[in-house]
């Protein structure tokens, strides 16, 4: 298997996130991991790279997309239902709290060109392809 740096970095990040997830013991004795992070699909189109993240129960005002040093970061929070007190639950399997996902971009990214849309609980981020570096012609006077 051939690894390139961004894929390897994402693999290491995911492995560390999984290893550092804290478990909690449910009333029926099962250990449940409740470190919630949205699942994502990443693919390339003619326009650029698309990142789709499933964010059920998250409002668009609770999500941020940031880019720094060619690392795209999705952050946000899913809040628990406040109308129901803990002692009223028979079972509670959904996870709540903050999430944080980072993705290393292969090419240089201009943050001003990134577009994001949020619809039906799915965040779609389009990172346009960088314009190819055009050669600059310099006239050289030979004396």
Image (tube, helix red, strand yellow):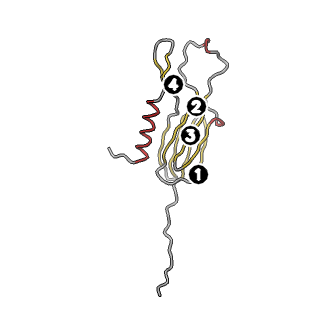
Whole-angstrom CA distance, mark 1 to mark 3, is: 14 Å
* N-term-proximal mark, 1 vs 3: 3
Whole-angstrom CA distance, mark 4 to mark 1, is: 32 Å
Which residue is under mark 2? 98
Counting other residues with Cα less than 10 Å from the Cα at mark 4, is it few (<14), some (14-19), or many (20 or more)? some
- Measuring 53% from the left and 20% from the top, which residue is drawn there? 93
- Quick one: SS at disc 4? loop
Counting other residues with Cα less than 10 Å from the Cα at mark 1, is it few (<14), some (14-19), or many (20 or more)? some
Give the number of the disc on residue 74.
Answer: 3
Task: Work out whether 121 lies above or below 94.
Answer: below
* N-term-proximal mark, 4 vs 2: 4
Give the number of the disc on residue 111.
Answer: 1
Which residue is under mark 4? 34
- Measuring 43% from the left and 30% from the top, which residue is drawn there? 19
- Quick one: SS at disc 3? strand
* N-term-proximal mark, 4 vs 1: 4
Give the number of the disc on residue 123.
Answer: none
Please state the horizontal and vertical placement of residue 45, each as a whole percent of the image: 49, 50
Please state the horizontal and vertical placement of residue 106, each as a whole percent of the image: 46, 51
Whole-angstrom CA distance, mark 4 to mark 2, is: 11 Å
Task: Work out whether 29 lies above or below 124.
Answer: above
Please state the horizontal and vertical placement of residue 99, each as a whole percent of the image: 55, 33
* N-term-proximal mark, 1 vs 2: 2
* N-term-proximal mark, 4 vs 3: 4
């Amino acid at each position: 298997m051939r690894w390139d740096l961004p894929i390897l970095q994402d693999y290491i990040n995911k492995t560390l996130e999984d290893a550092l997830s804290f478990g909690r013991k449910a009333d029926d004795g099962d250990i449940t991991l409740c470190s919630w992070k949205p699942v994502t699909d990443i693919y390339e189109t003619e326009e650029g790279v698309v990142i789709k993240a499933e964010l059920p129960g998250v409002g668009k005002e609770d999500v941020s997309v940031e880019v720094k040093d060619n690392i795209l970061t999705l952050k946000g929070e899913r809040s628990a239902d406040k109308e129901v007190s803990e002692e009223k639950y028979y079972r509670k399997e959904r996870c709540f709290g903050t999430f944080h996902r980072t993705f290393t971009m292969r090419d240089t990214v201009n943050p001003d060109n990134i577009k994001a849309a949020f619809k039906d609980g799915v965040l779609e981020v389009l990172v346009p392809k960088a314009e190819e570096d055009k050669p600059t012609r310099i006239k050289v006077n030979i004396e």
